[in-house]
């Protein structure tokens, strides 16, 4: 179901703003078209410090989805690699599903060191993966980015493919007067994805 989205943009809010605007334009929309559907909180900090703010926001605007960008930007505990701390962090994120609207919560995570396509786990303790329902994965090969999973509580799905396409935003310039570039993820058919890898 469609609904409102809260994006916690703690890692690189300026880059996210550009990608959001580029994505909106690539879909033939205007930023006003998504108006009250997407809210962005462009600061980092401990998730436990933001939980009440998020809950109060959802009371006025029930949420369908909360995206945490990134997990480490909102980490509330001492040691990122400690299993107990990682479990507590995952449990804090799970509390957000109780906000008005019963939103799904997606946390963007950095992978483990020396990540490979068959080892795309979030950096940190294994207790984090045990606590979450699904571990979606992204892997880029050439021009194709594949969305798949390594853990899934729910019905399986075939990998979904995207192409990262360069984009510029009309009227947005850097300090030297040059157009600012970013990328937009465009869905690909399985046939197109196969022919490009």
Image (cartoon, rainbow, N blue to C red):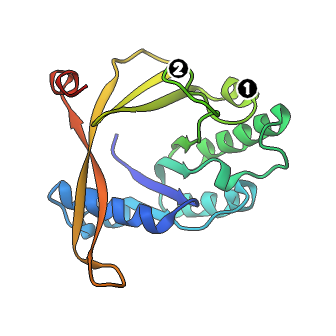
Q: Quadrant of the N terminus?
A: top left
Camera-nearest residue between 18 and 68: 18
Disc 1 residue crowd, few under 14, some 14–19, many 20+, Cα 10 Å: some
Camera-nearest residue between 58 and 189: 189
Rendering quarter of residue 195: top left
> Would residue 123 be found to the left or right of residue 41 on screen?
right
Residue positioned 66% across, 43% down in the render: 93
Camera-nearest residue between 17 and 182: 182
Disc 2 residue crowd, few under 14, some 14–19, many 20+, Cα 10 Å: some
Q: Which residue is mark 2?
A: 150
Q: Secondary structure at mark 1?
A: helix
| Relative vertical location of residue 8 with respect to residue 161 in this rendering, above or below | below
Q: How many marks?
A: 2
Residue at the extreme top = 156
> Would residue 110 be found to the left or right of residue 19 on screen?
right
Residue 94 lies, in percent from the top left, at 66, 39
| Relative vertical location of residue 62 with respect to residue 108 in this rendering, above or below | below
| Relative vertical location of residue 88 with respect to residue 152 in this rendering, above or below | below
Residue 40 lies, in percent from the top left, at 48, 64
Residue 115 lies, in percent from the top left, at 57, 29
Residue positioned 74% across, 61% down in the render: 49
Residue positioned 56% across, 43% down in the render: 107
Q: Is mark 1 in CB contact (under 8 Å) with mark 2?
A: no
Q: Which residue is mark 1?
A: 126
- Name the disc covering residue 115, or none: none
Q: Secondary structure at mark 2?
A: strand
Residue positioned 41% across, 15% down in the render: 156
Q: Quadrant of the C terminus?
A: top left
Label 1 or label 2, whichever comes before in sequence order: 1
Rendering quarter of residue 176: bottom left
């Amino acid at each position: 179901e469609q609904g409102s989205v809260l994006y916690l943009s703690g890692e690189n809010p300026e880059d996210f703003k550009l990608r959001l605007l580029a994505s909106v334009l690539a879909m033939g929309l205007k930023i006003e078209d998504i108006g009250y559907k997407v809210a962005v909180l462009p600061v980092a900090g401990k998730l436990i410090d933001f939980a009440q703010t998020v809950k109060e926001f959802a009371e006025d605007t029930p949420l369908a989805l909360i995206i945490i960008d990134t997990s480490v930007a909102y980490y509330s505990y001492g040691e990122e690699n400690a299993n107990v701390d990682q479990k507590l962090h995952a449990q804090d994120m799970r509390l957000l599903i109780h906000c008005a609207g019963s939103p799904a919560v997606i946390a963007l995570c950095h992978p483990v060191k020396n990540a490979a396509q068959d080892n795309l786990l979030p950096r940190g303790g294994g207790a984090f993966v045990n606590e979450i329902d699904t571990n979606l994965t992204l892997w880029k090969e050439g021009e194709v980015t594949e969305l798949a999973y390594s853990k899934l509580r729910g019905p399986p799905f075939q990998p979904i493919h995207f192409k990262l396409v360069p984009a510029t935003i009309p009227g947005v310039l850097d300090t030297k007067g040059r157009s600012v570039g970013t990328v937009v993820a465009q869905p690909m058919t399985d046939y197109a994805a196969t022919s490009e890898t």
